[in-house]
Amino acid sequence: MNEQADGIDPITLEIWWSRLVAIVDEGATALLRTAFSTIVRESNDFAIVLTNLRGESIAECSGGIPAFAGIIPRTIRAMLEKFPLGTWREGDCVLTNHPWIATGHLPDITVVSPVFHQGRIVGFAGCAAHSPDVGGNLSATCRDLFEEGVCIPPMHLYRAGERNEPFVELFLNNVRLPEQVLGDLEAQCTANRVCCERAADFLHDSGEPDFERLSAAVLEKADAAMRKAIAAIPDGHYVSTIEADGFPGHPTRIHCTITVAGDQMVVDYDGTSAQVDKGTNCTINYTRAYSVYPIKCAVDPLTRRNEGSYRAIEVRAPERSIVNAQYPAAVAARHLTGHLLSCAIYQALGKGVPEQVIADSGGAPAFRLGFAGVNDAGERFGQILFASGGMGASSRQDGLSTTAFPTNSGAGSIEALEAVVPLLLTRKEYRQDSGGPGRFRGGLGQECIVQSLAGRTVMMGMLGDRESHPALGLHGGMPGAVAQVILPDGTSASLKSQSTLMPGGRVVIRFAGGGGFGDPAQRDIAAVVADVADGFVSLEQVRKVYPQASVQVHGGAR
């Protein structure tokens, strides 16, 4: 261990490290309790980190979006280029939603505040959260960034405790839901303030003058744990290619080569589809985050995450590719590409360490539906429905059903959604036969039916994939079911389109299932019988893919 980390015994280090995580978790609690939008307080579309003076994360919140936590430190370092250390004041809040500086598309706003202790700056608290609205047109069909909304460069929301009212007035005049937008921004500032105060309390209690010695220790521990995990993977090149729907004439192709050499790993996306004039492009920040996080989950899942966790992993992507798009490319639907990176990585790593990865997840990419309109009281509303497909199966167990991965957003309370918009979910249930068959079955997707209770037309925007390309299985496992949206007239809608929902109209949304793992003929008979009894698998699917259980299942059905 280097000299800065010397003198912190293992027990003290564990206690201090745990307290840092508790600090950001308390900030997260403050955010969830004060946020106005259900996107944050119900669906957990946020992340909070604590960093040292150089913007290196030393603690991440336990909930929220892990990939955001991997990007916020880069955002802080970019802010430091514009606002050097000596210019920060206690009570500052600097924000940005610039996709190439922050988390990859305009709805995510990052707010950063300095941590002061004994009159000097010692670190930063950073919070990224999905805003209810940023203006513009957030469909996947925008041709460039300028169509997608207001792009905010790093600038002060608060300067030494005083709010930048001209900025607030300008921004709120360009969004559809100003009260919710401002409420969430203030909640982010509150979360940062809690982190700053608790961080200062920690330094006072520990007697440490700053975070330098502790950050050196936790970063080194996390780095060492990841390098040890990578060194256990056989050296070599692991290659995969993932195909996705994309757009007509512009299908998405992700080519991934992972090179393992000793305790280092390189993830290279050379050969991936070129940048497109649609919103499915990723910035390199987003690509890096959604590459290193699934690797962390697979090879080093137990060590707490921080900047040190990712030092041993290099991510390369050719410029002007769909995973390293150049400004001002459209990026509103970048998750439709970025969430698939975990699938490409696991398909590749599965050839070397199959016991450590999972099959493709039906919820990768996340399928989001936005509803907007005017309620019967004449008030404008806008809401995103978060719901998840099934996760892929592993070498040890079935995939988790209706569980988000690699993102960590959740559906939240349906009652909370119905309380703020004139919509009613008349059905929300597991989707039979949607999990990919295998020795271990893929997680089930779900079927939701949404009915409009508004007296006027409701606009519905869809951002999804896997309409034609299901989640793939691994090592003989079969793919899961594809996603589908059925409009009130019985026709299928493109998952990257906008439609209208008339008063009383109902739309059926079928979320994709996860891929299976291993040969279905090797699935335990008792597991098949249980699946049929629970309604997860139909008798017809048993006949097709689980012949070893056919006698028991059909015998029990008579």
Image (cartoon, helix red, strand yellow):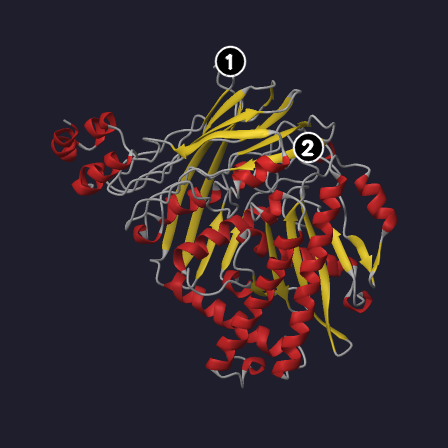
User: Is residue 358 positioned above or below 384 on the image?
Assistant: below
Q: Position of residue 284 (x, y in %)?
A: 60, 47
Residue 406 in view, yes or no: yes
Furthest residue toward top: 489
User: Is residue 159 positioned above or below 325 on the image?
Assistant: below
Q: Position of residue 378 (x, y in %)?
A: 74, 27
Mark 2 or mark 1: name the one nearer the start of the chain: 2
Q: Which circle marks residue 480 in the picture?
A: none
Q: Residue at x 75, y 46 (%)?
A: 182
Q: Which of the 4 quarters of the picture holds residue 215?
A: bottom right
Furthest residue toward bottom: 7
Q: Which circle marks residue 381 in the picture?
A: 2
Q: Which circle marks residue 489 in the picture?
A: 1
User: Is residue 122 positioned above or below 32 on the image?
Assistant: below
Circle 2 SS class? strand
Q: Position of residue 134 (x, y in %)?
A: 72, 39
User: Is residue 359 positioned above or below 113 on the image?
Assistant: above
Residues tagged 2 and 1 counted as in contact (Cβ below 8 A): no
Circle 1 SS class? loop
Tell me: 541 left or right of 177.
left
Q: Amino acid at mark 1?
A: Asp
Q: Residue at x 55, y 67 (%)?
A: 21
Of badges 2 and 1, the one in the foreground is 2
Q: Amino acid at mark 2?
A: Phe
Residue 100 in view, yes or no: no
